[in-house]
Amino acid sequence: MLFRSEIIVDGVRFTVVHAATAHAANNNETSIVIRVNYGNHSFLFTGDLPASGEHELVRKGLAACTVLKVAHHGAKTSTSQEFLQAAAPKYAIISVGANNRFGHPHPEVVQRLEQSGAKIYRTDHHGAVVFTTDGVRLTVSHFIEVSK
């Protein structure tokens, strides 16, 4: 089920752009997708949304975003080409543990992100990544640089 629910706090708009029913085939399909807008910048938090959920978002008219939190730690089952074309992020964040047993992020996902032109930050390489904005300017900082 797709629906929109939003709240505005101090000029920051939080919008639920996707929420699946409890009847999804697996737990990842129940991921909630939240868009945060403030001034000229938007952030899209995708949880573990699989490509099928991404397709629904695109079909419903997904708007471009400034920052994308890459779904499912960069698993091959998410971050499809179609989705990236619609989202058109300037920055992509992959939340992933170093040397994880799943091999995340998948090399194909990283390649798609690189081809999209997004600046990629990975928590296994950069540690915590923090974006700060006043609605006009956007800055990014990170806390470590791990050798690859």
Image (cartoon, grey):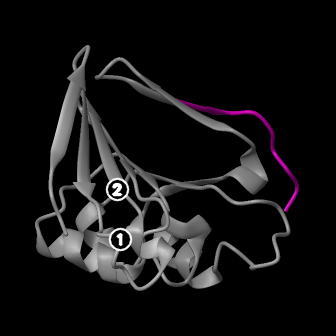
Residue furthest out toward the left: 60
The verdict on residue 127 being magenta is no
Q: Which mark is residue 78?
A: none
Mark 1 vs mark 2, CA separation in Å:
15 Å
Residue furthest out toward the top: 10
Magenta span: chief secondary structure: loop
Tell me residue 21's x, y (percent). Answer: 29, 69
Q: Which residue is mark 2?
A: 33
Disc 2 element: strand
Q: Nearer the viewer, mark 1 or mark 2?
A: 1
Q: Quadrant of residue 83?
A: bottom left
The verdict on residue 146 being magenta is yes
Q: Is residue 58 above or below residue 93?
A: below
Residue at left 21%, top 75%? 56
How crowded is the residue under tag 1: few (<14 C-alpha within 10 Å), some, or many (20+)? few
Instruction: Say left or right for 33 vs 92.
Output: left
Amino acid at the residue labelled 2: Val
Tell me residue 130's x, y (percent). Answer: 58, 32
Instruction: Say left or right for 63 vs 103.
Output: left
Amino acid at the residue labelled 1: Ala
Instruction: Say left or right for 85 vs 30.
Output: left
Residue at left 69%, top 74%? 104
Q: Which residues are magenta?
A: 140-148
Q: Quadrant of residue 51?
A: bottom left
Q: Nearer the viewer, residue 107 or 38?
A: 38
Residue at left 73%, top 46%? 126
Residue 122 appears in view = yes
Q: Which residue is mark 1?
A: 22
Tell me residue 122's x, y (percent). Answer: 66, 55
Q: Is residue 47 above or below residue 22?
A: above
